[in-house]
């Protein structure tokens, strides 16, 4: 597919808002919190009838929704910074848990019981965090790349298609990597259990994101209209702010 050339022979470029925006900072903070809480919840195996999952199942799709939103509005560089922030926050959480467990506690029955509970609950989190970091980095990188590449080609058109395509690919990579590394930490010991865990985890996460996709697209459009730097990028090309508008700000790489 080709696009009309601008004056000077340059092809239209995708528009992105300034990542110094307070809205970006808010989404970045929420993503880091979601990743840390998901890691804690992920250390608990959860069973719903024949379905095996973990305690972080209801939180983690939000991280991908935020990743899609950040990439679409602020670009792939901003998405990489968000991924790195989640990575570093997770490492900080694991170090914090290790220090808490290592600190000398009370020696009465309650103190001993509490120490044992902390070791049981937070001790395996390092493995969950490792699994989460590997899955998150791989999956979000695929997710962000697809969002960026499709926007570079389609500009402001095809937002739902970008969200749908990036979600499926990113979640597949994330789920396979995460489940492979985290399985033993939550008590999964057989190939059948792993397949159950991975299959239903993937289906669930993609289903949630597809279900809220119209809302995600709506929020993205609202934020685009509210971000002065995004509107400036569109206005620089004289294309307006509609869904079919092109833009002239250099695409981020």
Image (spheres, helix red, strand yellow):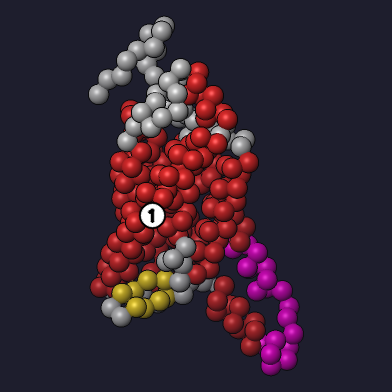
Q: Position of residue 8 (x, y in %)?
A: 41, 6
Percent x, y of residue 169: 31, 48
Residue at position x 36%, y 38% in the image: 159
Quarter of the image with the N terminus in it? top left
Left or right of residue 106, residue 144 in this image = left
Residue 133 in sight in this render: yes
Residue 57, position as x, y percentages in the image = 42, 66
- Asked if the stretch drawn in magenta spans residue 187, the answer is no
Q: Nearer the viewer, residue 183 or 249?
A: 249
State whether residue 173 appears in this view: no
Residue range (magenta): 94-112
| Residue shown at 32% from the left, 69% from the top | 197
Question: Exactly how many numbered labels are in the figure?
Answer: 1
Return the residue found at the far bottom: 109
**Quarter containing the C terminus:** top left
Residue 28 vs residue 209, the one in the foreground:
209
- The residue under the point 51% across, 47% down is 83
Give the residue drawn at x 31%, y 19%. 3
- What residue sits right under mark 1 in the picture? 212
Q: Position of residue 147 (x, y in %)?
A: 38, 38
Secondary structure under tag 1 reads loop
- Of 157 and 222, nearer the camera is 222
Predominant SS along the magenta part: helix
Relative to 79, does residue 38 appear above or below in the rendering? below
Q: Quadrant of residue 134?
A: bottom left
10 Å neighbourhood of mark 1: few (<14), some, or many (≥20)?
few
When the figure is inspected, residue 165 is found, relative to residue 57, above or below; the finding is: above
Q: Is 197 rendered above or below residue 5?
A: below
Instruction: Name the quadrant containing residue 209.
Output: bottom left
The single residue placed furthest to the top in the displayed view is: 8
- Quadrant assignment, res 243: top left
Relative height, residue 156 to residue 12 (above, below): below
């Amino acid at each position: 597919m080709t696009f009309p050339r601008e004056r000077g022979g340059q092809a239209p470029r995708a528009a992105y808002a300034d990542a110094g925006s307070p809205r970006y900072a808010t989404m970045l903070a929420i993503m880091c919190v979601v990743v840390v809480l998901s890691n804690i919840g992920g250390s608990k195996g959860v069973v719903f009838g024949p379905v095996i999952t973990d305690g972080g199942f209801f939180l983690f799709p939000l991280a991908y929704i935020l990743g899609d939103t950040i990439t679409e509005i602020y670009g792939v560089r901003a998405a990489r910074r968000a991924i790195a922030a989640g990575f570093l926050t997770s490492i900080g959480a694991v170090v914090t848990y290790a220090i808490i467990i290592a600190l000398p506690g009370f020696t009465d029955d309650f103190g001993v019981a509490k120490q044992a509970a902390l070791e049981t609950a937070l001790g395996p989190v390092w493995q969950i965090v490792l699994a989460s970091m590997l899955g998150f980095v791989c999956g979000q990188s695929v997710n962000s790349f697809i969002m960026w590449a499709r926007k570079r080609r389609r500009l402001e058109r095809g937002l739902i298609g970008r969200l749908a395509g990036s979600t499926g690919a990113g979640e597949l990579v994330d789920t396979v990597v995460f489940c492979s590394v985290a399985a033993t930490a939550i008590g999964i010991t057989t190939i059948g259990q792993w397949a159950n865990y991975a299959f239903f985890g993937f289906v669930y996460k993609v289903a949630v994101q597809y279900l809220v996709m119209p809302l995600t697209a709506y929020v993205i459009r609202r934020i685009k209209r509210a971000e002065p730097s995004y509107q400036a990028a569109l206005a620089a090309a004289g294309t307006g702010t509609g869904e079919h508008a092109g833009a002239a700000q250099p695409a981020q790489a």
